[in-house]
Amino acid sequence: MRVGPDGVLLLLVVVTQSSSVVMFSDLQQETPPDHIPDNTTLSIYHNLDHIPDNTTLPIYHNLDHIPDNTTLPIYHNLHPEVLPTPPHNKFISSLTYHNPKQDFPHKSNHNNNHPSSTTHEHTEKLNTQELTEMKISSINLHNYTTDIFTTRRDTTSLSWLLVTVVEREMKECDMVVVYDAAYGQTGVLDELLLLPNIRQVVEVESVADLLGVVWVSAGCRGYLMLLHQPELLLVYVDQGEEHWHYHGRYFFVGLSLDQLMALTVSKKGRKTEHITGAVKAGTEGQEWKLYMNQLFWGDGLIHVTTWRGHRFSSQQVSLYPDKLTDLRGAVLKVVTFVWEPSIFYYRAEDGTVLFRYGTDIMVTEALGQALNFTIQYEEPPNGEMWGITTENGTLTGLRGKLYRDEADIGIANLYMTLNQRVGTEFSAPYDTESNCFLVRAEPPLPPWQALAFPFHPWTWLAVLVCLLLSGPVLLLVARGSAKSGEEVPSLQTLSDCYTNTFGMHLRVTAVHLPHRASTRVLVSFLWVYTIILTIAYCTNLTAYMLVSKQPRTINTIKELHDSGLKVFGLGDLFKRELSAASDPYLQGLSKTFQVHSSPLEIFPNVLAGRGALLENEGHLLFSATTRFTSRGTSRVRIMKECFAPYNIALGLQSNSAIKRRLDHVIGWLQQAGLVRRFFSDGLRLAASTEEYGGGAEEGEEVTGPRGVIPLSLDHLQGIFLVIIGGWLCSGLVFILEKCLLPYRK
């Protein structure tokens, strides 16, 4: 046995006649004999490609192919499972079998040479089931010619087709073979089941049998489906999208062209990457036309090649080409809507959208350039945005379009969550966003209070106590020192000591210095104390005069929960996420959560102080800057403590065939740093438009971040209040002195 130049197995044929042995080798290369003598025993005659016409083979063992018009008087040692069914116009003249399980009709004489065997002769068609219930020893066929051998040739041609497909296109794949009873009774699977990569064989009698197929595989998996009655399969593929391997390599046999088309456009079929089917051409059955699905390349099926006899008409054609690396300009529907700063619309004066831009738009367009597909933008129904899950379980908005396969891709700052994935699929993430709370910004404290801001109230109390104690202590030290010698008169009264001490706190130098050493030591320490104190105060005072101090407001989730304010959001996503959180304060916020369909409905409530808006940080920051900021002051602010970060991805149809290729390209975009670049470009372009403000308002003074800010009356109103207070106090003292002067005299 050896292999020929065409890869065909060539087997040794041994012919014995009497005591002679004749050997025929390499029958494809040598001219076969024109005549084999009668009564010649062919001990091994396997895979013979040609037997001359009208050749009598008295004993013929394990032959896979018999040409037309060949008479087989004796068929020796034939096993029932490989016995072909005689056509209706042929008959078996006699047969010999051993150990019969039941009486066979038309009994006649016993074979003397085989006492344990029985010979039957009849001239009517024998039932195949009857033949399989006995062990055949030999059979004589009369006039058993063209029809039976045509069936045998058809089976062999199909068997070679299946083996060739597996060896060429699925050599490295695990294999699943699915067949029905009609194909199971033929020998078409014999050669196929000898291949090493067969992993599962399933006989189908009902739709439930298809559920037993292993539809999940981490690697390559091929599916050979041989069905004479494909109606069960067509019902199965249109029932849902589960229990199917969408990236497997399928090869169907037994379907008509219309049935193969119906399979391709079914719920499962239209998302399957590789579908190939063999459709019988003509009545002889040695020619099969192979069709392939086009997926994104076009509608329906395309004819790939034709199988004739034992070879393809086109040898270089691939049955399972890569259909996703180049989509050949296919139009993909992308559903989206305005959501700054991820998606912007640039409109004409009449409201027509001229173009779209932003991070999500630029990522999608980069994917279109890499995979060669054209984008057709669509929008969800007005006000539905991402959509919600209704009481009857249906999805609306962007997610609803993906769920109903009305769009191929959805983009709008989509979060990758388990709740969002119901009915849809996500690509690999390309960005991350935190979710924060937007609340009303309370007006700043009056600028005149800046004089008290540098020190904490407890610090002010400590300074006041020190000031009150410094006067009496200085008086006691000065009077004690005066007993030992002369001391300055300005330190001999309590009022004079308080005046000197207060002047030190204001950096006013005393007119007369103390004479005694003990007094000088105390005054020196008072100077050090007041210098440090006044420097700290002046430094902090400058900062508080330039920056408005905000009142104490809500900054944590606990404070928001305790405040009793409502929480607003778009859609029901955050409500489900809050209720599923482990933090009891977050769970409490889910009870006060209110769903709205537009941020324009929420902003008035936030400005009125009735609640907080929960949304991604980028959108909140952009809205606060563009909608609610005037002359550097914003009417809203973002709480310091946020909810949770989420990955952002593209929304896809469930089991989308293009997901794997999109994930690869998204990985390239992230590694190149293009996503951050797209975000910066989107903000820069938005800032240059009139809608989002490209400069300062007319008459508004703008200073850069490094410019010098002049102090205004607002900054210094505190000191003017001090001088006014001083005038009032001095006037009040003057009045008291005038009133008390007569009593003094």
Image (cartoon, rainbow, N blue to C red):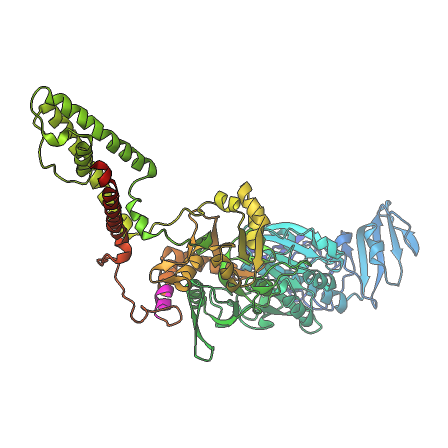
Q: Is residue 331 left or right of residue 34?
A: left
Query: Which quadrant is the C terminus positioned in?
Result: top left
The residue drawn where x is 37% and y is 53% is: 444
Q: Is residue 447 left or right of residue 399?
A: left
| Depicted 538 relative to depicted 690: above or below | above
Near-viewer residue (329 or 552): 552
Could you say where residue 41 lies in the image, as x and y percent from the top left?
Answer: 71, 55
Near-viewer residue (38 or 576): 576
- Figure quadrant of residue 254: bottom right
In the image, the segment drawn in magenta is 682-688
Report the label total: 0
Could you say where residue 104 lies in the image, as x and y percent from the top left?
Answer: 90, 53
| Depicted 293 relative to depicted 568: above or below | below
The residue drawn where x is 72% and y is 62% is: 235
Q: Residue furthest top?
A: 484
Residue 172 in sight here: no
Query: Magenta-highlighted stretch: main secondary structure?
Result: helix
Near-viewer residue (429 or 29): 429
The residue drawn where x is 17% and y is 38% is: 503
Is 687 contained in the magenta span?
A: yes
Could you say where residue 456 lies in the image, as x and y percent from the top left?
Answer: 32, 39
Residue 653 in sight here: yes
| Depicted 219 relative to depicted 152: above or below | above
Is 21 contained in the magenta span?
A: no
Near-viewer residue (311 or 109): 311
Could you say where residue 483 lies in the image, as x and y percent from the top left?
Answer: 11, 20
Q: Is residue 33 left or right of residue 230?
A: left
The residue drawn where x is 89% and y is 60% is: 122
